[in-house]
Amino acid sequence: MSQTPSTGIPGMLDVAAIEIEPDEPVSGFRAGVVDLDYSLAHLGRYWITLIAICAFGLWHVGTNLFWNEPGLWQNAIHYGGFGFLGFITSATFKRHAEKPWSIALDIGLGLAVAASAAWIAGAETGLYTRTLAETGLPWQFTPIDWAAGIIMIVAAIELTRRMTGWIIPALVIVSLSYILFLGEILPGVFRAASLPLSDVLFRSLYNDEGMLGIIATISSANITLFMIFGAFLVVSGASDFVIELSKIIAGRFRGGAAFVAIISSALTGTISGSAVANTASTGIITIPLMKANGFRAKFAAGVEASASTGGQMMPPIMGAGAFVMVSFTGIAYSTIVIVSIIPAILYFLSVGFMVRVESMKHRIGTEQIAAVDWKKLWGGALNFVLPLGIMTYMLVSGRTPSFAACFAIGTLIVVSWVTPNRMGPRKISRALVLGIKTSIMTAVLLVTVGLINNAVTTSGLGNGFALMIAQWSQGSVLIAVILIAIVSLVLGMGLPVTAAYIVLSILSAPALAGLLADGILVEMLVNGIADPAQAAMFALVDSPHVANIAQGMSLEAAKELVSGMPFELALVIRPALIDTETLTVFLLTAHLIVFWLSQDSNVTPPVCLAAFTAAGIAKSPPMATGVEAWKIAKGLYIVVLLFAFTPLIGSGFWESIQIGGFALFGIYSLTALIQRYSEGPIPAWLYPVFVAGGALCFIPLNLPLNVAGALLVSGSVVFTSRAARRESRVGAV
C-alpha cells in the first residue's frame, strides 16, 4: 500500500491519496470497511453484491423520480434491500466473519428479510379480504404471513442491535410488550388496554405509524437520496473544495486554523448525515492543522466536535431532522429550512467567539495555516456550488425533497464533465456504493423506530408522557426544556441523534408545544375573556379563579388556572382560543427545541461520540475533550432558550434579525465570562458589566435595552483590548 501525504502538514497523511496496490488481497468488506477504490475484479465473490448495491441506489432514484410505486411496496423494497445489506456487511459472528459458513448464514438471513418484506407487501390485499369477509374476527393472517411478519420484526431488532447497541432493541421489546400486556398492569397515566397478538402484528406492519409507514417513507423517499447526493459530492471532489475554501476565508483571521474547522464542518454538514462522520472526515485534516497552529489538543478536538455537531443543524439538509420534522408537523420543508438559518449562524458564531477568545488568551493562532491547494479548489468548486445551489433553490421554491435531490445528482454528473473530476461510470458506481453503504444504519434504524412509534401512538402513551411533563413542569417552559434536555442526553448515550430526536419528539414535542401555547391563554385570562362561549370552556377547571375570567385576573392566578386544566380539556381549549397559525408556530418551535437538544449528546459527557472521535484524532483525553466540547458548544443551549422564550420562530424577518443580531452580543459576553478573558484580561469590576450587557441583549424586541446592552458589551471589549495593548507595550519595554 502506497501512501502520499498531501495536506501540507508534516507527518499527516491525506486519506484521499492512499492507493491500493494491484496485488493487495481483499479483506474487510464484511466489516463495512472495504476501500471503494478496489476494482470490481479484485472483489472476487463480492462483485455481485456491489453491482446489486449500485442497482439498489439507482432504484431509489428511479422510484422517486420516474415510477409511482405504492408507498407500502416502496418501503418494503427499501427495508428488504437494506436489511439484506445489513446482514451481509455486519457478521453474526465477528470472529468468523470471513469463513464460508458465516457468510452463507448472513446471506441466508438477508434473503429471508428481503423475501419477508416482499411477501408482506403483496399479502395486504388478501389480508383485508379474509378479515373483512369474517366480520368480528381479528386479523386473519396465514401461517406464511405470521412467519414473514415475525422475521421482519426480529430482523429489525437484531440489525439495530448490531449497528447501535442494545438501547433501541430494548425500547422496541418494551414497546411491543407494552401494547401486548404491560400496559394493562401499569398504574396511573401509563395504564393502557392490551391488544391481541394479531392486532399488534397488523399495526406494526401496515399502520401508517408502523414499520413500513410514515417514518420508513422519510427514509426511502428523502434521506437515502440525500445521502447518495452527499456521496456524489464526496466522489466528485466537492469535499476537497470545502476544505480549501475554508483556508482562504479563515486564513486572514487570528486562529485561522480553527476557523477552517468551523467553516469546513458547517459546509460539510450540508452533505453529511452524521456528526461523528463529519468529525472523522474533516477532523483528520483540521485537528492536526489546529495543533500545528498552537491550539491545545483537547481544544482543537472540542472545536471540531462542536462544529461538526452544528453541521447537523445547518440548512438546507440538516441531517435527517428536517425530513422527520416535515412528516411530524406537516410544515413545508422550505419553511423549516428558512427559519433554521439564523439559529445555525448564531451557533457557528458562538463557536467562533470561543476560538477568538482562546487565541487572544493564549496568544496563539498567528502561524500560517497550510497552503491552499488551488487544483483541489477549482476542481471541486463547480461540483459543489452549482448542484447544491440548484437543490437549495428547489427546496425553498416548494419542490419535493426527493425531486430536488435527484435533480441535484443529475446536475452534478453533467456539470462534472466541464471540470477535472469527471463523473464517469466508475465514479458514479463508487458514489452509489458509498451513498447506499452510509445509508444502511439510518434506513434500518428508521424502520425499526416505526415499531416504537406505532406502540406509542396505538397505546396513547404519548399523551401519558405529555401529561407527566405538564405535571412535573407545573406549567414552566424552562423546567420542561430542562427535563427534555436530561432525557435527550440519556437517550443520546446509546442512540444516534436521528433516533433520539424521533423518540423524544413523539413523546415530548406535543406537550412542549402545549406549554408554549398556554402562555397565550395566560395573557388572555389576565386581560379578561368577555366572550361567554369562550369563557364557558374553563367551567370544568377546578379553580376558584374561574369566576374572574370575564373581568381578568392577576398573572399568578392566570398561571394557576391554566396549569390546573385537565389534559383532555386543554386539548380542546387551545385550538378554540388560539388561531391555527400560532399553534403551528408553537409546534414547530417545540420540534426545533427537541431537535437541537437531541444534538447535545454529541458533545456532552459521559458519552459524547463526536467528541470522543475527535479526541482519538487529536490524541487527547476523551473525557477532558468532552468537557471542552461541551463548553465550546454552549451556543446550542442558548439557541434553544431563544426558541423557547423569544419570537425567533414565527416573527417577521426584521424581528428575527433583531433578536439574532443582539443575541450575538449576549453570546460573546457569555463566552468572555466562561473564559474569563475577552480581547484581554477582564478585571473584577468589569464582570458585572459583561453580565448586565449580555442580559439586556437577550431581552427580545426591546430596542432601547438591546442597544444599551450592546454598548455595554462593546465598551467592555474595547476596554480589555486597550488594556491588553498597554500591557504588551510595557512588557516589550
Image: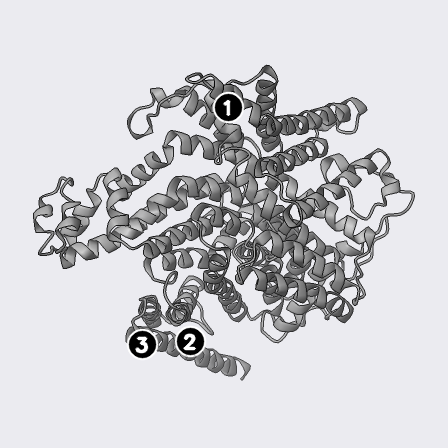
Residue 86: where, in percent of width, then height? Answer: 67, 34
Label 2 or label 3, whichever lies nearer to me, is 3
* Mark 1: amino acid: Leu
State whether residue 613 appears in this view: yes
* Callout 1 secondary element: helix
Q: Is residue 513 left or right of residue 285?
A: left
Q: Is residue 562 left or right of residue 220?
A: left
- Say which of 338 and 106 sits in front: 338
Gap in angstroms between the C-alphas marked 1 and 3 = 62 Å
Q: Is residue 359 left or right of residue 557?
A: right
Residue 158: where, in percent of width, then height? Answer: 60, 27
* Mark 2: amino acid: Val
Residue furthest out toward the right = 23
Read off the residue under disc 2: 717
Gap in angstroms between the C-alphas marked 1 and 2 = 63 Å
State whether residue 167 appears in this view: no
Label 1 or label 3, whichever lies nearer to me, is 1
Read off the residue under disc 1: 201
Q: Decide which of tag 1 and tag 2 comes sooner along the chain.
A: 1
Q: Residue at x 39, y 60 (%)?
A: 649
**Is 86 placed above or below 421 here?**
above
Q: Residue at x 84, y 51 (%)?
A: 19
Read off the residue under disc 3: 708
